[in-house]
Image (spheres, rainbow, N blue to C red):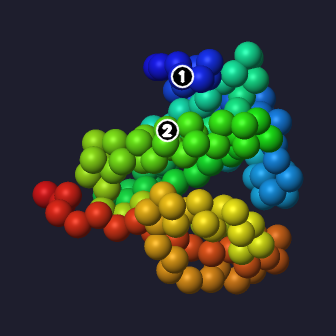
Amino acid sequence: MSETNGIEIVPYVEDHFFQIVRREHDIKSFMGLPHPEMVAKMFTKGPGFTGIKDGEVVASAGVMIIWDRVGEAWTVTSPLVNKYASFFHKTIKDHLDKVINQYRLERVQCFVDKENKMATKWAEKLGFEYEGEMRKFFQGKTYLRYSRITEGLGG
């Protein structure tokens, strides 16, 4: 795809999910699922990409198309993402904007662990708006639902 900051941006494939060294909150969430292989495959249900630096997966992100005009945004990050935070914010925001237009999505949603304050702030910087709490959503924890609504793409 492309390369910037020495980071190669490639299409997401299932293996990337298992190659990434996860940050603590990603270990608790994604790897705590009963079948992480199902999650890795599920992430292929829409456009996604992975950033690789010197053979290491820095982050993967994408939008699963869950039905007509609706997508679910996701990211999995390694500790390396902190070193390239501005680059990844811009890359993910650009990718999200392109996916919304290409797939004519009217709604893109995401969920964030309520305790992960950095992720909630980041969702808002990406243009997502808070919709509400999802109590006991996963492992008895509360997650927050965010959405990004786009008007005028229907038809």
> Mark 2: which secondary structure?
helix
- Circle 1 Cα neighbour tier, 10 Å, few/some/many (<14 / 14–19 / ≥20): few
What residue sits 76% from the left and 46% below the top?
36
Rendered image: mark on residue 16:
none
Question: On the image, which quarter does residue 117 sit in?
Answer: bottom right
What residue sits 52% from the left and 71% below the top?
146
> Mark 1: which secondary structure?
strand
For this orientation, the residue located farthest to the left is 155
The percent coordinates of residue 88 (x first, y second) are: 58, 40
The percent coordinates of residue 151 (x first, y second) are: 23, 66
Query: Do we see residue 34 in this rendering?
Result: no
Is 154 left, or right, of 35 in this rendering? left
The percent coordinates of residue 46 (x first, y second) are: 46, 42
The percent coordinates of residue 119 (x first, y second) are: 66, 62
Sequence-first tag of 2 and 1: 1
What amino acid is at disc 2? Thr
Question: On the image, which quarter does residue 155 sit in?
Answer: bottom left
Please say if 21 is above or below 147: above
Is 138 left, or right, of 88 in this rendering? right
Q: Work out how far the residue at label 2 is from the one at label 1, CA to CA, in angstroms.
A: 10 Å
Which residue position holds label 1?
Answer: 4
Please say if 111 is above or below 88: below
Whether residues under marks 2 and 1 lie with C-beta atoms below 8 angstroms apart, the answer is yes
Which residue position holds label 2?
Answer: 91
Is 38 left, or right, of 31 in this rendering? left
In this rendered view, identify the residue nearer to me: 81 or 37. Answer: 81
In this rendered view, identify the residue nearer to me: 152 or 138. Answer: 152
- Circle 2 Cα neighbour tier, 10 Å, few/some/many (<14 / 14–19 / ≥20): some
